[in-house]
Image (tube, rainbow, N blue to C red):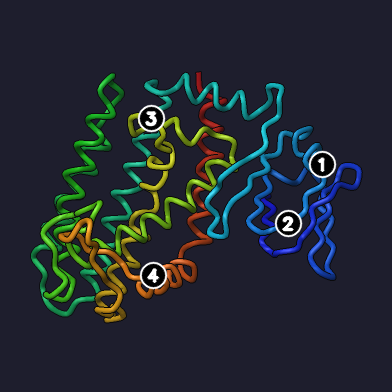
Amino acid sequence: MIVEISEHGSMLKRDHECFVVHKKDEKTEIPAEKVDAILVTANALISTQAVALCLEKNIQLVLANWAGKPFGRFWVSTPGRATEHRRKQYLHQNTIVAFKIAKDLVTCKLRTQKKFLVDLKGNRKTLNETLDNSIKSINKSMQNLNNLTFSPSFKQTLLGIEGFAAAEYFSAISSVLPKKYAFKERSRQPAQDKFNAVLNYVYGVTYSSVEKSVILSGLDPNAGIYHADSYGKPTLVFDLIELFRTKADRIAVKLFTKKYVRDSWFTSSNETPLGVFLSKEGRKAVITIYLQEVSDTVEKESWLYCRKIINLLTTEH
């Protein structure tokens, strides 16, 4: 289990082989053997003995900001489970194990994209040829993916399949938006239109949720399995977010098709005048619906997928 301390003024102490969490008038005792990780997102007091218990039991103790984005963690000075997991993670960058994980990530992404387009089609009273054609194209991509076998260039092949499906997918997404918000293509850093501005922000919030789970699991967030390593970039987080992009897409589409969006949500920048950004009002509105609808699911499922990766790394040879 993950213990999260998010209430200001809380205390984390140790009582023999148990953690004791004090919150105002509430006191909770948790056996260390049941704890996988502890996340502290509030101003809290942590005893050195509680830290020692984490290190003795190889329990991740992570410090994060109010939004859950980690900025530090405690490491045991001797090799443990996390060390072994990371060692295997580095060894399996281009092996059959990496292929299995990468193929599964792309498969899950395409499956959820297709499901979303089918749902959109079912909610429409009139025929949308773009939706139909995109669904057929994604079906074809899924067939190609299913027939794919391991080769040294599997990452490039998977990226090609994913990229083709993405172009069809976002064409379909644009076709269901109100005409004033339709877009030609995905745009990032900065967004060139209002829909992509919202989508980029939702993706950014999702990155934080996934990164938290990756760090808590003990895996190295900077050692990607599918995406190529890039200095200073959490490429394993880039890998796992593929599982949840469609959840973010659903939020963005809902905001536009249900007419929640307001012009006051958007602003421009003097530095990049051609870009579109979310205003403070827009960011608040988007993060509110994210926290209400998908935050808990993303954190839970990304944690479970990290455990799945660890299992594959430690059982496959």
Q: Is residue 49 left or right of residue 168?
A: right
Q: Which residue is depicted at the point 35% across and 31% down?
A: 230
Question: Where is residue 119 shown, x and y percent of the image?
Answer: 28, 67
Which residue carries the number 1 mark?
48
Q: Which residue is depicted at the point 73% across and 46% down?
A: 35
Crowding at dot 2, Cα within 10 Å, few <14 / some 14-19 / many 20+, comes out as: some
| SS state under label 3 | loop
Q: Are marks 1 and 2 in contact (CB under 8 Å)?
A: no
Which residue carries the number 2 mark?
44
Which residue carries the number 3 mark?
231
Q: Are marks 2 and 4 in contact (CB under 8 Å)?
A: no
* Three-letter code, disc 4: Val
Which residue carries the number 4 mark?
286
* Three-letter code, disc 1: Thr
Question: Where is residue 260 shown, x and y percent of the image?
Answer: 31, 80
Near-viewer residue (10 or 217): 10
Residue furthest out toward the right? 16
| SS state under label 4 | helix
How many numbered marks have been drawn onto this rendered protein structure?
4
Near-viewer residue (127 or 162): 162
- Relative to 282, does residue 148 appear above or below in the rendering? above
Answer with the quarter of the image where residue 27 lies: bottom right
Q: Could you tell which of marks 3 and 4 lies nearer the N-terminus? A: 3
Question: Where is residue 309 shown, x and y percent of the image?
Answer: 50, 35
Residue furthest out toward the front? 270
